[in-house]
Image: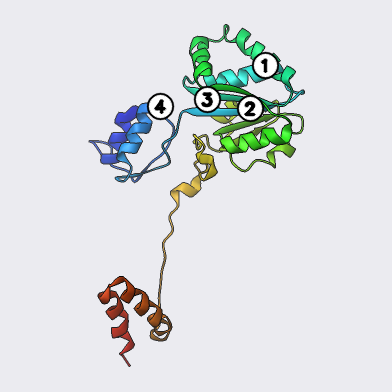
Amino acid sequence: MGGAQAVAALAYGVEGVPRVDKIVGPGNLFVALAKRFVYGDVDIDSIAGPSEVVVIVDGSTRADFTAYDIMAQAEHAPGASILIGWDAKVLDAAVAEISRLLLEIDRGELARQSLEDFGAVILAKDAEEACELADQIAPEHLHIATENCAELAEKIRHAGAIFLGNYTPVALGDYAAGPSHVLPTSGTARFASGLSANDFLRTNSILHFTQEGMMEMADDVRVVATKEGLTAHRASVEARRLIV
């Protein structure tokens, strides 16, 4: 099953498909809206999209590599593609390659429209500013395609997944490398992470007081309950204080 109808079937159950407690995974706009609709009846991972990438480049980055990295995101249509560097010649060469190679890919016109609507090229003053900008954007995918990529990655706090070096295109994470490609979008990497086994774990609390332990907290509970006007709360503790 796929699409919004699959989300509905999993959330509420149909013949042959029992209802579930949590729905996760990527999808198009219709899937995202369906997940938003059923949230509360079931849990979801997030309402993600559109997909996005920030690519940081320097003089070591091949222009055709950069062009394909940018176009790979744009061909999602929509897909936000942002190129950041501190060498104008490097950026100009990449843009020229994008213009040339858009004519060669199957979804070239869709990618071109996506780049016109959601693309950007940013000339930073240096590597430090490039990292600051990427961190502010907090992208779903961050590809640091520079000579000192590991060093720059240490400056990044906010990104869904970080791809290092000229031989780690985002497509590896899309299809094969893992660990998960369900990632936070639209700047939510500031407070969210990619889907992991942790999302399927829950915690609860167990409290067990003796009478003596309860009495140590009884006065605090009495004061707060009285302030809130919840006298039954207060009485539930006071009644137990009287027991000898």
The 10 Å Cα crowd at callout 1, few under 14, some 14 to 19, many 20 or more, is many
Q: Which labelled disc corresponds to residue 55? A: 2
Is 174 drawn above or below residue 17 in the view shown? above
Residue 8 seen from this side: yes
Residue 1 seen from this side: no
Mark 3 sits on what residue? 80
The 10 Å Cα crowd at callout 4, few under 14, some 14 to 19, many 20 or more, is some
Q: Real-space Cα distance between discs 1 and 2? A: 11 Å
Q: Is residue 22 left or right of residue 169?
A: left
* Foreground residue among 227 and 201: 227
Q: Secondary structure at mark 4?
A: loop
Kind of residue at disc 3: Ala
* Foreground residue among 108 and 221: 221
Q: Quadrant of the N terminus?
A: top left
The percent position of residue 95, horizontal first and vertical second, equals 64, 15
Q: Real-space Cα distance between discs 3 and 2? A: 11 Å
Q: Is residue 164 left or right of residue 47?
A: right
Is 6 drawn above or below residue 224 in the view shown? above
Kind of residue at disc 4: Asn
Q: Secondary structure at mark 2?
A: strand
Q: Real-space Cα distance between discs 3 and 1? A: 16 Å
Mark 1 sits on what residue? 94
Kind of residue at disc 1: Ala
Q: Residue at x 77, y 23 (%)?
A: 59
Q: Secondary structure at mark 3?
A: strand
3 or 4: tag closer to the N-terminus: 4
3 or 2: tag closer to the N-terminus: 2
The percent position of residue 165, horizontal first and vertical second, equals 70, 29
3 or 1: tag closer to the N-terminus: 3
Is 74 drawn above or below residue 36 in the view shown? above
Q: Residue at x 44, y 34 (%)?
A: 48
